[in-house]
Amino acid sequence: MTYWRRTGAHTFEPTAYVGGSWDPATQHVASSLGVLAHEVVRDRDARRSDGLAVSRLSYDILGTMPIAPMEVEVRVLRPGRTIELVEATASCGGRVGVVLRAWLTAPHETGLVAGTDLPSMPAPDETEPWPMSDLWPGEFIATLELRRKDMGPGRSAAWLRTDHTLVADEEVSPLAQFATLLDVSNGVAVRTDPRHYAFPNLDLTAHLFREPVPGWVGLDTTVSFGANGVGLTCTVLHDEQGPLGTVAQTLTVRQQTG
C-alpha cells in the first residue's frame, strides 16, 4: 500500500490513502510534505555525492489541495560548497499548495560535543495504543498506528508509524519517511473538540540536529491557543534513539459553523 505513485519526472498520482481530516475531499497535507522532502533528497543526491545533511524543513501551506495529480519542482536558491538553501513546491492544477525551503549543511565530526537536554519520553512499548480515527476522520489518519500518553488538553506524548510507502516502487530516505508524519503533531494533543473549533496549521518548520532512524516517530507535543484566533503547536521530535529536533506549527483557530 502506498500514498503516491510517480507518473513522470516531476509528477505524482495520489491514492485514496491521502484523504484529509478537515475535509475528506482534499489531501491531508502530511504525505505531500513527505513527497517534497523526498524530492529535495533525490535532487541533492543527483547533483552531488557529499551527503549534505538536511537541518531544516520549513513548509508554508498556501491552501488545501485536491486529491488529484501533483507536480513538484525543486530549485537551489543558495548554492554552496558546504551550505545550500533548496526550495521545493507542490502544485495541483497549476495552483501552488505548499512551498518548502530546506537548509542543507555539510557534515562535520562533532561526536566529542554531541548531546542534548531535550526531555525524553516514554518508549513505544510503555505507551498505550490510541485509536486516533475515533477523533479524526480521513483515509490518511486511518493508515497510522498510534500509541499515546494523554497529559491533558493540549498536551501528549505520542508514537506513530505506518506500513504504507510514501512513493510506490521507490527507495525513500528515512528523512522523507519521517517528514511524512510530522504534520500529525497538530492532531495528537488537541485542546478542544475539532467538531466545535477548527485549528488547521498554516505552516510547519522542523529543525533537526541529526538524521532520524527508521521506525517509530515520537511527538512530545504542546498546543497553545491565544484569545485572538491564533494558536501554536510545539513538538519535540523523537525516534527510538531519543530526541532529534523540534517542530513548530502556526494555527488559525476559529469556531466551527453549521
Image: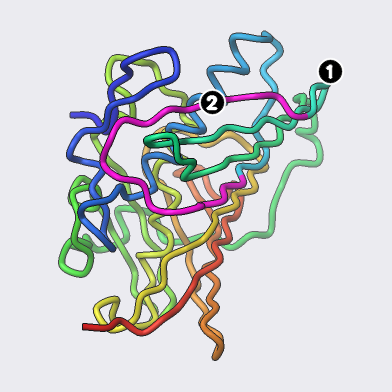
Give the side of residue 144 with respect to residue 150, left or right: left
Residue type at the position of mark 1? Arg
Asked whether 69 or 115 is in front, the reply is 69
Tell me which corner region of the image, top left, top right, bottom left or bottom right, holds residue 170. top left
Residue at 42% across / 64% down in the picture?
Answer: 186
Classify 104 as above or below 217. above
Classify 23 as above or below 53. below
Give the side of residue 177 with respect to residue 77, left or right: left
Residue at 44% across / 75% down in the picture?
Answer: 155
Residue 32 shown in magenta: no
Disc on the earlier residue, 2 or 1: 2
For residue 144, say whether it is visible. no
Within 10 Å of the Cα at label 1, are there few (<14), some (14-19), or many (20+) other Cα atoms? few
Residue at 55% across / 78% down in the picture?
Answer: 230
Majority secondary structure of the magenta segment? strand
Residue picked out by circle 2:
73
Residue 65 image point, x, y percent: 36, 46
Q: Which is closer to the viewer, label 2 or label 1? A: 2
Give the side of residue 76 with respect to residue 223, left or right: right
Residue 75 shown in magenta: yes
Residue picked out by circle 1:
81
Q: Quadrant of the C terminus?
A: bottom left
Please tell me whether mark 2 sits on a helix, a strand or a loop: strand
Q: Which residues are magenta?
A: 58-77
Residue type at the position of mark 2? Glu
